[in-house]
Amino acid sequence: MKKGDIAAIALVLALALGIFAATVFFAPKAASVTVEVFSSGERIYSAPISENAEIPVSGDYRCTVVIRGGEVWVEDSDCPGGDCMRMGRKNRAGETIFCLPNRVEVRLIGSDLDMIAG
Amino acid sequence: MRTKKLALSAILLALALALSYAERFLPLELVIPLPGVKLGLANVVTLYAIYALDPLSALAILILRCIMSTFFGGSVTSLAFSLAGGALAFSVMLGAKKISALSEIGVSVIGAAGHNIGQIIAAAVLMRSMGVAAYLPVMLVAGIFTGVAIGFAVQRLLRIKV
């Protein structure tokens, strides 16, 4: 172990903290949250989280994005892996759900700060 | 000498393949729900090859490992991840090796960070979103641990003359 090694570790740690701080800092503390659903980079849905909805997504695979009771989750996905369903229910601005095989992304956006993807 | 190098490269490729296959059974998706994201255990081979062989052989082993591990049930997504992660890890380790203040451990830690950043870049391109960057801090910290462990292992390995 050389001195430079410690510096390298410190550098990576600082980078991790910096990115973490940036994501927390930019995460909007909005009272109302907008849900946006993207399929292959294209926005197919956008509405407040208070609005109950079931959004069928048909990309390479089929899945359903469910918005109910102020929570968002993915149901009935036939994508391999099914990680999107295991990501659970989201309700805070800045949170996201991904389905990589199906190229689906669900973003929860604070309505007063709508440029953030945290 | 050429035969010896060829044999060593083949052994290293086999080892790298075994490691990236074994890595698949680590339930990393529970922490980072991006299928295909890896700890980068096969980086131990890249690092060793950079020191014990030469950059070109190391790169050949890396690319062959990424492609061949796809045959063992990997997806196109995981190929993109391992190529992006592996290529960035390789480049930064090659650069870091030139810094005399760094031992194999420091080079390995930088390589692990490169591996994680490369994977996240691949995910960001695939998702067309920077949102995936939120997973980077967790991955970077985990990478420090794997990086130190791998660097330590390579340091010991290099003392064995082949």
Image: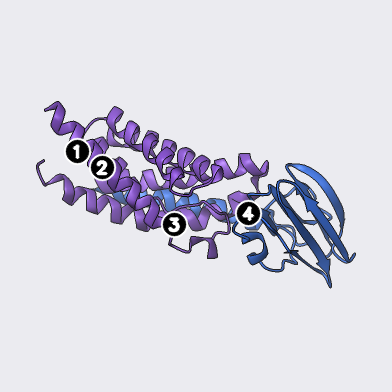
Chain colours: A blue, B purple
For the residues marked 1 and 4, what is the alpha-carbon distance in whole angstroms?
44 Å
Look at discs 1 and 4 and give the one toward the viewer.
Answer: 1
Q: Secondary structure at mark 4?
A: helix
Task: Mark 3 and mark 1 in contact? Answer it, CB < 8 Å.
Answer: no
Question: Alpha-carbon neighbours of circle 4 within 10 Å: few (<14), some, or many (≥20)?
Answer: many
Q: Are marks 2 and 3 in contact (CB under 8 Å)?
A: no
Above or below for A36 versus B55? below
Label 1 sits on a secondary structure element that is helix
Q: Amino acid at mark 3?
A: Arg
The residue to which callout 1 is attached is: B8
Position in image of residue B78 (x %, y %): 51, 46
Q: Chain of mark 2?
A: B
Of callouts 2 and 3, the N-terminal one: 2
The residue tagged 3 is: B24
Q: Report the residue marked by disc 4.
A: A23
Q: Which chain does the numbered disc 3 sit on?
A: B
The alpha-carbon separation of the residues under discs 2 and 3 comes to 19 Å
How far apart marks 3 and 1 lie (CA) works out to: 25 Å
Q: Which mark is residue B135?
A: none
Other-residue count near label 1 (Cα within 10 Å), few / some / many at <14 / 14–19 / ≥20: some
Residue type, numbered disc 4:
Thr
> Are discs 1 and 2 less than 8 Å apart at CB?
yes
